[in-house]
Image (spheres, rainbow, N blue to C red):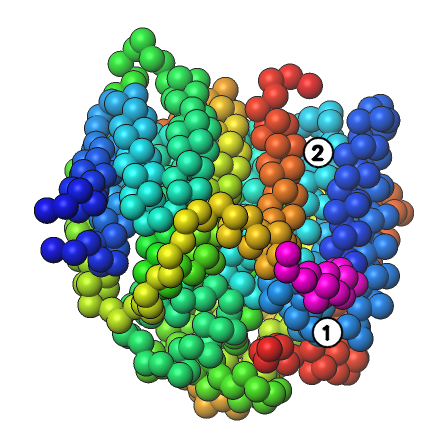
C-alpha cells in the first residue's frame, strides 16, 4: 500500500467518520466541531485529486468562514448553559423512516457510482490549478463571476437587514 | 501571451445583449445609494426601482430583434426568454405599485429601503434564470433569486408568522437547491460538460446508464419543482404564502414561478431533447427515459393535491396558495408534452395567470388592510359593501377557474388544446376534472360576497380613486384578454421556439 | 488496489446520504444547515473527482468554487433569519415553529 492510498483512506475515514458524528451526535456543539474535521478531510481529498486551489479555498471559506458562522449560529440560538444544547431528533417513527430512506438512497447512489460508465479520460500533467481556474473565471465564467458578486451584495444587504435588532 | 481579441470582441457583443440586466444592476446600486442619502423618504428606493423597471422595459423592447448565445454560452437571449422577462418585469412593477399602498408593510416596519432594493435584486436573478444555459449559471441565478425572496418573505420581521415563513422558505429552499446541485454533478460526470447544449449533444451521441440519468433528472427536478411549487416539492408553499407580506406572496406566485418554468423548459429543451441543429417544432426525447410520463405524473399530482386541499381552506391567502399550486399543475401538463405548441400554451397561460392572480392578491391585500382579516368570513357581503371590489374579485376568480369570457379561459383553452393534440387525452381529462373541483372553492368566495350576511355587514368600505384605478388596471385586461386575445397568441407563437442550437 | 473514480464517488454518495439523513431527522434548524453543508460538500467532491478523472476538466473545479461561494452566502442569510426566529420563539426547532395551521 503506497502513501497516496494510505492518505486516501485516512482522509476518507476522517470525512465519513466525523460526518456521521455531525448528523448523529445529540450535542449540537459536538456536531459543529465534528464538521471541522469533515471539512478538513474533504480538503485532503481535494489535494489527492490535484485540486490544490480548492483545498485551500475549502479550508479558508468552509472552515474559516461557514463553520465559524455556524458556531456563532449555535451559540446565539441555543442556551449553551442549559439542557437545550442537546438538540433532539424528531419522533422515532419518523426517525425509522429517515433511516430507511437514507439507506435506500445510499444503496442507489453506490450502485450508480460503481456501475455507471462515466465520462473518463486520462488526465494531462497539471502543476497548479490556480492559474487555470483564474483564467476560466475571467473568460468563460466571467458572467457567473460577476453575477456572484451581485449575489453576495444582495446577501449582505439582506442579512444585515434581517439581523439588525432595532430600526 | 495569448491573443484575447476574439474573446473581447465576443464580450462586447455579449454586453449589448445584456443591456436590460445591466440596467437592473444600475437600478439596484442607485436605489441603494438613494436610500442612504435620503433617509427620510420612505419610498425613494421604490420610486427608483419603478423608474429602473420602466427603463429596463424600454431596453427590453429594443431587444426584440437581438437573439443569440452570449458570454461563452452562459446565457441565451431569445424570444422565449424575452416573453418570460416581460411577465417578470410587469409583475414586479405591479407589485411595487401594490407596495406603495400596502398598509401591512407600513404598520409592520418603518424602513422600506431594502424591501424595494431586494425586489430589484430578485428581478435580476430571475432575468438571469430565464436565459441561463449552463449548470453553474442556473444554480447561481436560482440562488440570486432565492436569497432575495427568502429575505423578502420575512421582511416584516417583527411579525411572527412572516419570520416563520422566511425560515421555512430558506431551510427547505437551501436543501432543495443542494439536492439539485448533486444532480448537476452527476450530469457533469456523465457528460463531462456543464453547458446544456453540450450535455444534450453528448447524450444524443452516447448511450448512458438509465438509472444514473433518471436519478440526476429527478434530483434536478427537485430544484426546479421547488421553485414552481410542484407536488411533492410544494410543502413550503402554503406556509410561506400565508406568512409572507401579501405583496411578496403575489410576486412569488407569479414571477418566481415564471422564472422557474423558463429554466425548467430550457433545461429540458437543451439537455434532454433533440434536435439541436435548427428550429423544429417536434422535440424528441433523448435516451430511453420517458420524461413525458415523469412530468405528466408530476402535473397530475400537483393539480390534484392543490385543488383538493384548497377546498378546505378558510384563509384566503392560504387558499390562493393551494390554487397557485394547482395552476402550476395545469402548466406542467403543457410542459409534459415537450413541444413548441406546449411552450406557446404555457406562455399564454402565464400572461393571463399573471394578471388574474396579481388581481386576486391585490384584493386580498386591500380587504386585509381594511378589515384586518384574511379570513373568508371577512368577504361576507363584500359585493354590497364595496361593489367595484366585489365585481373585480368575481372577475378574477372566474378567470382563475377558467370560465369564459375571461383571460383564464383562453389560457386553459390553449393548454388543453396542446395536451390533446399531443395525444395525452387522459391528462386533459384529469385537468378538466380538476378545473371542475376548483370551481367549488372559487365560487364559495363569490357566494360569500353576495349571498351571505348581507344585512349584518352594512358598513361601506371605501377606497381612494388611485386604488380603484389599480384594481381596474388588472380587472379590465382580464376581461379584454378573454375576448380579444389574438395579439397575445401571436406574440406567444413568435416566442415559442427555445434557442437550442449553438 | 488503485484508488479510482468510484472510490471518491462512494465517499460522496455516503456523505450525501448522511447529509440528507441529518436534514430529515433533525429538529434544530442549525443542525439541518449542517446536514445541508454535507450535501453541498458531497456534490463538490463529485465535481472535483469528475474533473480529475475526466481529463483535468477545469469546469468541474470552477463549479466547485461557485458552490462554495453560494454556500457561504446561503449560510449567512439562513443564520440571520434563524437569529430573527430566535428573537420570536426563543428556540429554532423546525417542527415547533408552527404558528400557521393546516
Question: Is C69 drawn above or below residue B57 in the view shown?
Answer: above
Residue B460 sits in quarter: top right
Which percent across, then down, holds residue B59?
Answer: 83, 61
Residue ranking furthest to the right: B465
Residue B8 magenta: yes
Disc 1, SS:
loop
Depth check: give the residue in front, B221 or B359. Answer: B221
Among numbered discs 2 and 1, the one appearing first in the sequence: 1
Question: Please, which chain is the residue tagged with disc 2 on?
Answer: B
Q: How many numbered dots are placed on residues in this image?
A: 2
Which range of residues does the magenta coloring cover?
B1-18
Which of label 2 and label 1 is nearer to you? 1
Seen from the viewer's position, the closer of residues B243 and B1 is B1
Q: Are marks 2 and 1 in contact (CB under 8 Å)?
A: no
Does residue B436 belong to the magenta stretch? Answer: no
Give the SS element for disc 2. helix
Question: Is B147 above or below relative to A108?
Answer: above
Residue placed at 21% from the left, 28% from the top? A25
Q: Chain of mark 1?
A: B
Marks 2 and 1 sit apart, C-alpha to C-alpha, by 34 Å
Q: Residues within 10 Å of mark 2 (few under 14, many from 20)?
A: many
Q: Main secondary structure of the magenta part?
A: helix
Q: Against B255, is C20 above or below? A: above
On the image, numbered disc 2 is attached to which residue? Answer: B114
Asked whether residue A47 is in view, the answer is yes
- Given residues B179 and B185, the one toward you in this image is B185
The residue carrying mark 1 is B67
Give the number of the disc on residue C14: none
Task: From the viewer's side, name the closer residue of B357 and A53.
Answer: A53
> Which residue is most to the front?
B1
The residue at the point 77 percent across, 39 percent down is B29
x and y percent of residue B112 in the render?
74, 32
Amino acid at each position: 500500500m503506497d502513501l497516496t492510498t494510505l492518505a486516501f483512506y485516512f482522509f476518507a475515514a476522517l470525512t465519513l467518520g466525523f460526518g456521521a458524528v455531525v448528523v448523529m451526535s445529540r450535542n449540537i456543539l459536538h456536531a459543529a466541531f465534528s464538521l471541522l474535521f469533515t471539512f478538513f478531510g474533504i480538503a485532503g481529498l481535494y489535494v489527492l485529486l490535484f485540486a490544490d486551489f480548492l483545498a485551500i479555498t475549502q479550508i479558508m471559506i468552509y472552515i474559516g468562514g461557514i463553520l465559524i458562522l455556524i458556531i456563532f449560529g449555535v451559540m446565539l440560538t441555543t442556551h449553551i448553559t442549559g439542557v437545550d444544547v442537546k438538540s433532539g431528533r424528531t419522533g422515532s417513527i419518523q426517525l425509522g423512516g429517515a433511516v430507511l430512506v437514507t439507506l435506500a438512497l445510499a444503496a442507489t447512489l453506490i450502485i450508480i457510482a460503481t456501475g455507471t460508465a462515466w465520462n473518463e479520460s486520462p488526465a494531462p500533467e497539471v502543476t497548479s490549478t490556480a492559474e487555470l481556474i483564474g483564467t476560466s473565471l475571467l473568460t468563460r465564467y466571467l458572467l457567473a463571476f460577476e453575477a456572484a458578486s451581485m449575489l453576495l451584495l444582495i446577501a449582505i444587504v439582506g442579512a444585515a437587514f434581517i439581523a439588525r435588532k432595532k430600526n | 501571451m495569448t491573443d484575447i481579441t476574439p474573446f473581447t470582441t465576443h464580450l462586447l457583443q455579449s454586453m449589448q445583449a445584456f443591456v436590460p440586466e445591466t440596467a437592473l444592476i444600475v437600478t439596484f446600486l442607485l436605489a441603494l445609494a438613494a436610500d442612504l442619502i435620503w433617509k427620510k423618504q420612505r419610498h425613494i428606493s421604490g420610486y427608483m426601482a419603478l423608474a429602473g423597471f420602466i427603463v429596463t422595459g424600454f431596453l427590453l423592447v429594443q431587444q426584440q430583434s437581438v437573439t443569440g448565445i452570449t458570454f461563452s454560452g452562459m446565457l441565451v437571449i431569445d424570444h422565449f426568454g424575452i416573453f418570460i422577462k416581460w411577465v417578470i418585469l410587469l409583475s414586479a412593477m405591479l407589485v411595487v405599485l401594490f407596495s406603495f399602498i400596502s398598509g401591512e408593510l407600513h404598520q409592520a416596519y418603518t424602513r422600506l429601503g431594502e424591501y424595494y432594493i431586494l425586489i430589484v435584486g430578485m428581478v435580476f436573478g430571475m432575468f438571469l434564470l430565464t436565459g441561463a444555459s449552463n449548470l453553474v449559471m442556473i444554480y447561481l441565478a436560482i440562488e440570486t433569486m432565492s436569497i432575495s425572496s427568502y429575505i423578502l418573505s420575512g421582511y416584516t420581521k417583527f411579525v411572527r408568522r412572516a419570520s416563520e415563513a422566511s425560515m421555512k422558505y430558506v431551510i427547505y429552499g437551501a436543501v432543495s437547491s443542494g439536492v439539485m446541485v448533486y444532480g448537476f454533478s452527476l450530469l457533469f460526470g456523465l457528460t463531462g460538460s456543464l453547458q446544456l447544449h453540450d450535455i444534450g449533444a453528448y447524450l444524443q451521441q452516447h448511450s448512458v446508464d438509465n438509472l444514473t440519468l433518471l436519478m440526476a433528472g429527478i434530483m434536478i427536478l427537485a430544484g426546479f419543482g421547488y421553485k414552481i411549487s410542484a407536488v411533492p416539492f410544494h410543502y413550503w408553499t402554503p406556509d410561506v404564502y400565508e406568512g409572507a407580506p401579501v405583496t411578496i406572496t403575489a410576486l412569488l406566485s407569479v414571477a418566481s414561478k415564471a422564472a422557474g418554468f423558463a429554466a425548467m423548459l430550457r433545461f429540458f429543451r437543451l439537455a434532454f431533447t433533440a434536435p439541436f441543429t435548427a428550429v423544429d417544432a417536434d422535440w424528441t426525447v433523448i435516451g430511453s427515459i420517458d420524461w413525458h410520463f415523469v412530468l405528466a405524473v408530476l402535473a397530475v399530482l400537483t393539480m390534484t393535491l392543490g385543488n383538493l386541499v384548497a377546498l378546505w381552506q378558510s384563509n384566503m391567502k392560504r387558499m390562493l396558495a393551494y390554487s397557485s399550486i394547482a395552476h402550476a399543475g395545469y402548466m406542467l401538463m403543457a410542459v409534459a408534452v415537450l413541444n413548441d405548441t406546449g411552450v406557446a400554451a404555457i406562455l399564454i397561460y402565464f400572461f393571463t395567470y399573471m394578471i388574474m392572480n396579481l388581481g386576486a392578491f391585490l384584493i386580498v391585500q386591500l380587504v386585509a388592510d381594511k378589515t384586518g382579516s384574511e379570513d373568508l368570513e371577512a368577504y361576507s357581503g363584500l359585493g354590497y359593501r364595496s361593489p367595484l371590489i366585489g365585481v373585480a374579485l368575481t372577475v378574477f376568480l372566474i378567470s382563475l377557474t377558467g370560465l369564459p369570457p375571461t383571460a383564464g379561459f383562453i389560457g386553459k383553452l390553449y393548454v388543453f388544446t396542446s395536451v390533446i393534440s399531443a395525444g395525452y387525452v387522459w391528462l386533459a381529462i384529469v385537468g378538466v376534472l380538476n378545473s371542475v373541483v376548483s370551481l367549488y372553492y372559487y365560487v364559495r368566495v363569490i357566494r360569500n360576497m353576495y349571498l351571505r350576511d348581507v344585512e349584518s355587514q352594512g358598513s361601506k368600505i371605501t377606497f381612494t380613486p388611485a386604488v380603484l384605478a389599480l384594481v381596474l388596471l388588472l380587472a379590465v385586461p382580464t376581461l379584454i384578454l378573454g375576448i380579444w386575445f389574438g395579439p397575445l397568441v401571436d406574440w406567444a407563437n413568435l416566442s415559442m421556439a427555445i434557442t437550442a442550437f449553438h | 488496489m488503485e484508488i479510482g473514480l468510484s472510490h471518491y464517488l462512494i465517499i460522496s454518495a455516503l456523505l450525501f446520504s448522511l447529509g440528507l439523513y441529518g436534514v430529515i431527522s433533525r429538529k434544530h434548524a442549525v443542525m439541518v444547515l449542517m446536514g445541508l453543508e454535507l450535501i453541498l460538500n458531497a456534490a463538490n467532491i463529485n465535481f472535483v473527482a469528475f474533473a480529475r478523472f475526466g481529463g483535468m476538466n477545469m469546469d468541474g473545479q470552477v463549479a466547485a468554487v461557485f458552490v462554495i461561494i453560494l454556500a457561504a452566502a446561503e449560510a449567512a442569510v439562513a443564520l440571520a433569519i434563524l437569529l430573527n426566529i430566535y428573537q420570536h420563539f426563543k428556540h429554532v426547532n423546525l417542527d415547533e415553529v408552527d404558528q400557521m395551521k393546516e
